[in-house]
Amino acid sequence: MRFIKASLLLSLSLLTLGLAGCQSSGQKSTASFKNSSSQSSSYSAKEPDAAVTSSATSHKEEAQTYHPQAKLTKSTRYKKSGNLKKAGQYTFDKVGTQLTLSTIKHPQTTIKSGNLTYKVTTVRVIKNTAKTAAAKRMAAQALNLAQIKSPYYTLQVKFTIYNRGKQAVTTDGIQSIRLSGNRQLNAANQLSDASAGKTIPAKGKLATFATGLASEKTNPNLKTVKIKFAGAFADKKQVVKPTTWLKLTL
């Protein structure tokens, strides 16, 4: 199982992108996503489309006080719900980060390992613009950075894991995401994985996502990304091996 110490680290979207074992949950917080569980060297989130929220006492008040200018909420590109589906649409989180959808693809690509099938349904690149000092500070904390430059871009991958086996298994989520120039995102390097540590019932499925830091200041203009999913466990034993690299075209 993956052992990760709970900490005050704020988790980033994103989205959020391989240690062996299963992940334990810690404090709730997020950067680039809503309602995440934070770990010491990684962060995970339950819902996409928010930049930074925190349940930590010292940040809770400021995380709830940001309101965008009225003129920005009147645009047809503004989505109050945060359900970003088309390039150019944007939303705001509660500490002052504007999230603008830059790229979206729906590859519907699958890869198998053992009794598990992984289907990648959506890949998105989101531009995050910090409007407040709190937004920038909290994003940096979430990403284990001393500071972060705004805007910063996050890569979000939505996927479903299907368990064809007769026993429930606990997934270790994504082992690594490889970006341009062989840069990799993983649990110890700016990857938020909502799937890690989740149990998939026998003959069941898990719809989830992961998000990581793709770039600071400049649009990464990603053409392809590669994903390797980690193993899965039952009774503290690995019963599903990691996958090979799955290539996705953006």
Image: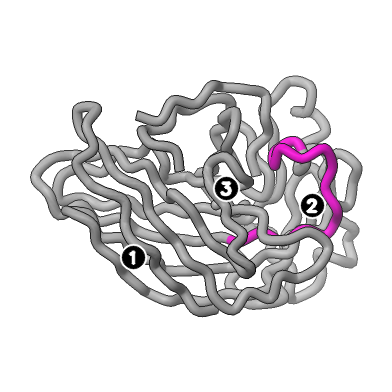
Mark pair 2, 3: CA separation: 19 Å
Tag 1 near tag 2, CB within 8 Å: no
Q: Amino acid at mark 1?
A: Lys
Q: Residue at x 57, y 40 (%)?
A: 188
Hey, which residue is sitting farthest left in the picture?
166
Q: Is residue 227 above or below residue 241?
A: below
Q: Residue at x 15, y 45 (%)?
A: 202
- Residue 228 among magenta residues: no
Q: Locate residue 18 relative to residue 39 in the image: left or right.
A: left
Q: Position of residue 169 (x, y in %)?
A: 23, 40
Q: Residue at x 50, y 61 (%)?
A: 157
Identify the mark nearer the N-term, 1 or 3: 1
Q: Which residue is mark 3?
A: 191
**Considering the image in quadrants, where does the N terminus appear?**
top left
Identify the mark nearer the N-term, 1 or 2: 2
Q: Nearer the viewer, mark 2 or mark 3?
A: 3
Q: Is residue 241 above or below residue 70?
A: above
| Magenta part of the chain | 141-155
Q: Which residue is mark 2?
A: 97
Residue 64 seen in this snapshot: no
Q: Nearer the viewer, residue 42 or 97?
A: 42
Q: To which quarter of the image does residue 108 belong?
A: bottom left
Label 3 crowd bin: few (<14), some (14–19), many (20+), radius 10 Å: many
- Residue 149 among magenta residues: yes
Q: Which residue is mark 1?
A: 119
